[in-house]
Image (tube, coloured by chain):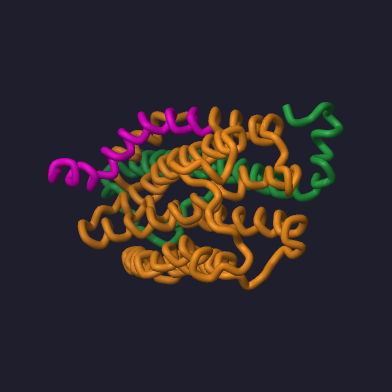
Amino acid sequence: MWAFINKLRSPKWFYAISAKLQPFFWVAATLLLLVGTVWGLVFAPADYQQGNSFRIIYVHVPAAFLAQSIFVSMAVSGLVFMVWKIKVADMAATVMAPLGAAMTFVALFSGAVWGVPTWGTWWMWDARLTSMLILLFLYLGVIALRGAFSSRDSGSRAASVLAMVGVINIPIIKYSVDWWYTLHQPATFTITGRAAMTMDMWAPLLIMVLGFYSFFIALTLMRTRSEILRREANKRWVRELAEETN
Amino acid sequence: MAFSSLNEFFAMGGHAVYVWAAWGVTALLMLVIVWHARQERRQLLHTVKRRVRREHAQRQSSPHAQPLQEPVTSAQKDVHHDA
């Protein structure tokens, strides 16, 4: 265990191991997203109440899942960075924030667009919608805070603390639909219980969710490697590596 | 298949605006994110490589000089501004 953690301390080791892992996640993401898109848009049956507008679920739900999962990952990375001073964890947290913000935006946007034909309104100060908007502001706050210090280490620590504190919003988002049931419906999609949806609507959603998660992992590996190049630009191994590429 | 023709598919049963707006924005954003990540990586490698070459050249023109040890400035903190 300690040997593993010590290895994680080395950006060079991470750079090498992530190079091997990365292709699998890109291939998985591409395949899953293609299959899920065709299945969800073309083959899944229309909803008996919502018609074809329900197909928005295939981008809305995976994006909302990612928006929350990325925030938790970011907070955990922040914790690992603060406790064990593992730089790679901070680099991963750095690149996770913009993707998390983008996914939160996708969830909010697709939800607003879906709300028009379904609820007759694109926005309401419903608990789920409001807590997701707060999540977007938390992401933007983490990004801004990181850049607000002249020393990188101060920025990293401030961003880690905000991520760890902000994670309290995640259970609020999750249970908002049960605690204050105003507009947004409770969860339709669960890994185990499929009762709320028929199999031919549920299966493409599962595939899209897995595709979005693969995308997240692949992109985080790729951009953490870039972040290593950025921060370790003066190290000999990075310089040698840069010279080898054309 | 839930549609009998291509036109019917694009019309989405009258919900074309909503379905294609939500899907379009999502797909576009994800493609831009991947494109940006590729550009970022390419640019970073390029910047490091250029710096290594510049230092080699400097060392060759003045062989007794100390190897250049640049302090990490804010410009290097964000190398892609440098390009």
From where the camera sits, is residue B81 visible? no
**From which residue to which does the magenta span run?**
A1-29
From where the camera sits, is residue A164 visible? yes
Q: How many marks?
A: 0
Q: Percent x, y for residue B55?
A: 37, 44
- Quadrant in the picture for the N terminus of chain B: top right
Q: Which chain is orange?
A: A
Q: Which chain is green?
A: B
Q: Percent x, y for residue A223?
A: 44, 45
Report the residue at 74% width, 31% height from top.
B2
Q: Is residue A153 above or below residue A64?
A: below
Q: Is residue A81 left or right of residue A36?
A: left
Prevailing SS of the magenta stretch: helix
Q: Is residue A174 left or right of residue A85?
A: right
Answer whether residue A28 is magenta in the image.
yes
The foreground one among A199 and A53 is A199
The foreground one among B23 and A27 is B23
Report the residue at 60% width, 44% height from top.
B30
Q: Is residue A16 above or below residue A94?
A: above
Q: Is residue B79 above or below residue A21?
A: below
**Res A121 → quadrant:** bottom right
For this orientation, the residue located farthest to the front is A195
For this orientation, the residue located farthest to the left is A2
Report the residue at 32% width, 66% height from top.
A157
Answer whether residue A156 is magenta in the image.
no
Q: Percent x, y for residue A180?
A: 53, 71
**Res A25 → quadrant:** top left
The foreground one among A94 and A186 is A186
